[in-house]
């Protein structure tokens, strides 16, 4: 019957359904990916990638910023005279810079003098210098030749402009190139890319980063197609509109920046013949960008790292990316969909593989988690795989698949409960429902631990109270003991009046079944204190329970007739547990176990070796132990008692009954010692067993 039920919910069929859900999840998310909020989710995930994997050590040290920051504004006149920029440019060229660019639009004459502009133009003409212009799609001035680059184009999708606002003439004449900084942020206002080229009448106008990098690379040939700009041997992948996706290496301050005031100090020191306060060696073969960093000048732009980064630092990142051919590449949307499908399919497969919803869900989370980790590693190597679509698709697959499996599991549980409730106890049925594959119809041999408990003097108690009161006490007692057994994974076999029979190790196998049984036995004894207080308040007598445990091979399974089954245990090991429960009466103990249980339980418990006995119905002697407490509950007094008892037991087994009796009698208020002392005196005075060389075994005469 179980095989028929399981075949109807085969693993293969379950996985196929889950794979179908994975496909639907990916298609659904692909439809949503065109919506603006999904685009923003992807952009946020890109920002997160930058923040969790900064790489400031990879930033090109050749890119240096000269900034008009707040401190410089306090020390320099405003507006800064252009002849000061000319002097600064002369100084930097003397220090060996490769190229310089101004992220400052000098589109109007100087307010100081005509000479102010011509000095800057003259200084610019002495090196490779780039000034910026504003590109327009309206009336303006014709874009000069210095504002265009020779580009071999075989196809492009570029933004366009018709006219420009160039730098003032006296400045522009000294420029090696005129470029634009007309940047466009993403839909959420964050700058993550730059436009490299703009289509203009008569050619292509470069951006400031492209012009600077091109000059620093000694003006190699340029070739443009729809997806790539090649600058000599350097290949720059392009996004739609001819934009380059920036690969930021870190937050504000990643690139070396020198305040403009420090350059002024260097100029003053040079004029006075004093040591230079700036390390000039860092400028050799560098690419310098002049720009604003003071908040009052409003050239702050949001980036993945900061809501207010100086715009010139964005341009510095672009220059770095071009010089090293290391902009961020982006995996195509189609390939991202394939990745999402692979991750979701794998999650679906793992979700259905184990057959257990929680375990399957835990396994199913691994593919998106591993993908997220790999995407970070790949990102650090310059490729961005959009993570939102694959991860959300996989999580949606897990959610939908979990709901599907939950519904299927509930149906299966109802079917199993209906099938087995006729011949299994409710406790066992619940475990079979959770672990149907572990239940074998018929008997099977397993190593387990059995549990037998009985209330001392229960017959006398039953004569003192009414049947109704007796049932009330029994229900209270059996409920509390049963809860403790079930809490540790035990199976309650049956109740026989006040007796409880239980076992650990079936239908669910536990390697630590003996330890579980010992812990439960101690818990049952401990539970008597609050139970007896409650019984005493109600006028009922207190209860004292004896427990016997036994570990070993036993047969477990469905036993009974063709019309009535019980899931129970059988075998000599089971009978031994029952006999040891009764043997507690002989020694005055509460919990008795054989050596097999004491050895299997491990070192978490304190056991006392009591004796070697032969129980009724079995010929083989067995060494029995008293289970006293958990190891952490032991005391020095208990340890001393156990040592003395062990010494006495050695004497007893050597048939030194006088010495054994004296040691046993020294242990006052200890029932097992009193029992053994009486036996030693009997053996000493009259019926001392004959020493035939065999171990001393005591035959129990009652159950």
Image (spheres, grey):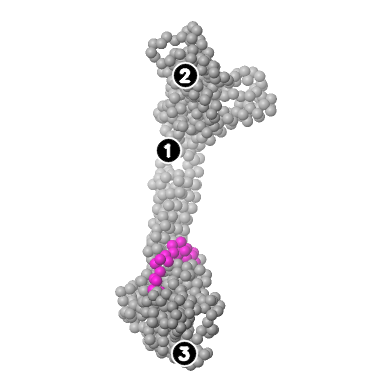
| Whether residue 494 can be seen here | no
Q: Horizontal placement of 637 versus 120: left or right?
A: right
| Residue on which disc 3 sits | 117
For image coordinates 43% across by 34% down, the residue present is 511
Q: Secondary structure at mark 1?
A: helix
Is 661 rendered above or below residue 69? above
| Whether residue 11 can be seen here | yes
Q: Secondary structure at mark 2?
A: helix
Q: Nearer the viewer, residue 219 or 26?
A: 219
Q: Position of residue 566 (x, y in %)?
A: 48, 28
Q: Position of residue 385 (x, y in %)?
A: 41, 63
Q: Position of residue 291 (x, y in %)?
A: 47, 78
| Residue on which disc 1 sits | 437
Magenta span: chief secondary structure:
helix
Answer with mark 1 or mark 2, whichever residue precedes in sequence: 1
Range shown magenta: 39-63
Q: Which numbered circle lies on residue 649? A: 2
For image coordinates 62% across by 18% down, the residue present is 460
For image coordinates 40% across by 83% down, the residue present is 129
């Amino acid at each position: 019957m179980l095989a028929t039920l399981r075949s109807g919910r085969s693993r293969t069929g379950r996985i196929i359904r889950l794979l179908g859900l994975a496909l639907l999840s990916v298609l659904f998310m692909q439809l949503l990916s065109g919506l603006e909020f999904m685009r923003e989710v992807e952009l946020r995930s890109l920002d997160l990638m930058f923040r969790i994997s900064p790489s400031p050590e990879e930033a090109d040290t050749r890119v240096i910023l000269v900034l008009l920051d707040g401190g410089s504004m306090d020390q320099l006149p405003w507006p800064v005279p252009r002849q000061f920029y000319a002097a600064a440019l002369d100084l930097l060229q003397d220090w060996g810079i490769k190229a310089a660019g101004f992220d400052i639009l000098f589109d109007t004459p100087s307010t100081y003098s005509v000479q102010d502009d011509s000095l800057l133009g003259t200084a610019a003409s002495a090196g490779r210098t780039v000034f910026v212009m504003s590109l327009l799609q309206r009336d303006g001035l014709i874009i000069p030749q210095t504002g265009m680059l020779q580009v071999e184009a075989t196809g492009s999708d570029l933004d366009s402009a018709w006219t420009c606002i160039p730098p003032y003439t006296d400045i522009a004449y000294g420029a090696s190139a005129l470029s634009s900084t007309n940047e466009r942020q993403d839909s959420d206002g964050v700058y993550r890319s730059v436009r490299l080229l703009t289509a203009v009448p008569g050619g292509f106008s470069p951006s400031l980063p492209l012009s600077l990098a091109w000059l620093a690379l000694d003006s190699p040939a340029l070739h443009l197609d729809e997806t790539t700009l090649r600058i000599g041997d350097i290949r720059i992948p392009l996004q739609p509109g001819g934009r380059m996706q920036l690969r930021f290496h870190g937050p504000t301050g990643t690139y070396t920046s020198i305040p403009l005031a420090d350059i002024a100090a260097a100029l003053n020191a040079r004029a006075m013949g004093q040591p230079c306060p700036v390390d000039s060696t860092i400028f050799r073969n560098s690419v310098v960008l002049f720009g604003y960093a003071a908040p009052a000048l409003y050239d702050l732009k949001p980036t993945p790292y900061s809501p207010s980064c100086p715009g010139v630092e964005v341009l510095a990142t672009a220059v770095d990316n071009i010089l090293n051919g290391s902009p961020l590449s982006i995996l195509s949307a189609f390939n991202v969909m394939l990745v999402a499908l692979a991750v979701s399919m794998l999650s679906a497969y793992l979700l259905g593989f184990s057959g257990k919803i929680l375990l399957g869900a835990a396994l199913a989370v691994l593919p998106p988690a591993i993908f997220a980790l790999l995407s970070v590693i790949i990102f650090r190597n310059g490729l961005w795989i959009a993570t939102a679509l694959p991860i959300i698709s996989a999580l949606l697959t897990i959610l939908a698949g979990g709901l599907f499996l939950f519904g299927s599991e509930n149906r299966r549980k109802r079917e199993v409960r209906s099938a087995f409730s006729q011949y299994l106890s409710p406790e066992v049925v619940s475990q079979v429902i959770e672990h149907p594959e572990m239940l074998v119809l018929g008997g099977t041999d397993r190593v387990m631990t059995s549990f037998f408990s009985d209330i001392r003097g229960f017959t006398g108690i039953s004569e003192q109270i009414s049947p109704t009161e007796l049932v009330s006490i029994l229900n209270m007692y059996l409920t509390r003991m049963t809860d403790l057994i079930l809490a540790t994974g035990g199976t309650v076999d049956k109740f026989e009046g006040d007796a409880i029979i239980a076992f650990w190790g079936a239908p669910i196998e536990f390697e630590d079944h003996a330890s579980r049984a010992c812990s439960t036995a101690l818990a049952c004894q401990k539970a008597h204190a609050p139970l007896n207080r409650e019984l005493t308040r109600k006028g009922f007598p207190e209860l004292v329970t004896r427990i016997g445990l036994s570990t070993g091979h036993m047969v477990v399974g469905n036993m009974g007739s063709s019309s009535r089954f019980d899931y129970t245990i059988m075998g000599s090991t089971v009978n031994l547990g029952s006999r040891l429960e009764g043997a507690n009466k002989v020694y005055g103990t509460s919990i008795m176990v054989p050596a097999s249980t004491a050895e299997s339980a491990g070192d978490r418990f304190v056991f006392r070796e009591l004796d070697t006995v032969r129980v009724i119905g079995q010929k083989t002697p067995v060494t029995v132990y008293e289970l006293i407490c958990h190891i952490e509950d032991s005391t020095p007094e208990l340890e001393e008692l156990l040592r003395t008892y062990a010494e006495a037991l050695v004497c007893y087994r050597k048939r030194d009954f006088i010495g054994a009796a004296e040691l046993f009698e020294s242990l006052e208020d200890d029932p097992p010692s009193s029992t053994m002392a009486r036996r030693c005196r009997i053996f000493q005075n009259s019926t001392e067993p004959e020493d035939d060389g065999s171990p001393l075994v005591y035959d129990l005469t009652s159950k």
